[in-house]
Amino acid sequence: MLDRWTMPLTQRPLKWLARRLAKTGVRPDQVTVAAFVVGMLTLPLLAMEAYGAALVAVLLNRLGDGLDGALARLTDHASDAGGFLDIGLDFVFYAAVVLGFALADPAANALAAALLLFAFIGTGTSFLAFAIMAARHALDRPRFPRKAFYYLNGLTEGTETLLALVAFCLWPAHFPLLAGLFAAACLITTATRLAGGYLTLKAMPRASE
């Protein structure tokens, strides 16, 4: 929901960083993998209840997630392979953060973590399933032209997910409540994406027509 406003604000600083990184010869896919490795540190850090360090790992991961795309566009290395790697590792990272909170305090957090993972499956599958169909019908991406996949927006997008992860780390004692609220928002996103995607594709002419 907020990405349409926050993404334009991040482009200038990301381009500035990408220009300096390009001079070192680093490739976009290397940034993607490095950001993922740093992000996965949140799992053991959260399990050890090192919430401050986990927050730093989350923020560095999200910085790398934006920087790899900016670097790819700057160096003309944007590719479907890079986009696939980026989105695939993103979903693994999100799940790892939730699992980390479940391991930190299983008695208090496990049920809320399971609910949030269930909701993540809904948002992820509805997002990716529509992207497949959008590619088949060559639908454009007017709001998010820099995305590697067709970006079917909703109530919970990248910005909201980042804010939720930050909130989890800042107020870990309230994880069950925060995770429950975010899971509800994710389920609303799933429902609206499924309905919107279905109606959009239903209105498309068949390939044989």
Image: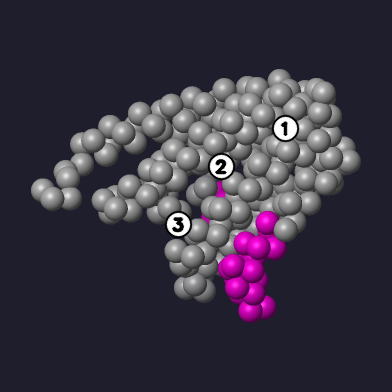
To which residue does mark 1 refer?
Answer: 167
In x, y percent, where is residue 145?
40, 54
In x, y percent, where is residue 52?
84, 42
Mark 2 and mark 1 lie on one chain; the one further toward the N terminus is 2
- Tell me if I can see residue 147 in this picture: yes
Q: Are marks 2 and 1 in contact (CB under 8 Å)?
A: no
Q: Dot 2: few (<14), some (14–19), or many (≥20) neighbours within 10 Å?
A: some
Seen at 81% across and 28% down, the residue is 106
Mark 3 and mark 2 lie on one chain; the one further toward the N terminus is 3
> How far is mark 3 from mark 2, CA to CA?
14 Å
Seen at 81% across and 35% down, the residue is 103
**The quadrant where residue 47 appears:** top right
The three-letter amino acid code for the residue at tag 2 is: Gly
To which residue does mark 2 refer?
Answer: 158
- Numbered label attached to residue 148: 3
> How far is mark 1 from mark 3, CA to CA?
28 Å
The three-letter amino acid code for the residue at tag 1 is: Ala
Mark 1 and mark 3 lie on one chain; the one further toward the N terminus is 3
Q: Is residue 66 magenta?
A: no
Q: Are marks 1 and 3 in contact (CB under 8 Å)?
A: no
- Label 2 element class: helix
Magenta stretch secondary structure, dominant: helix
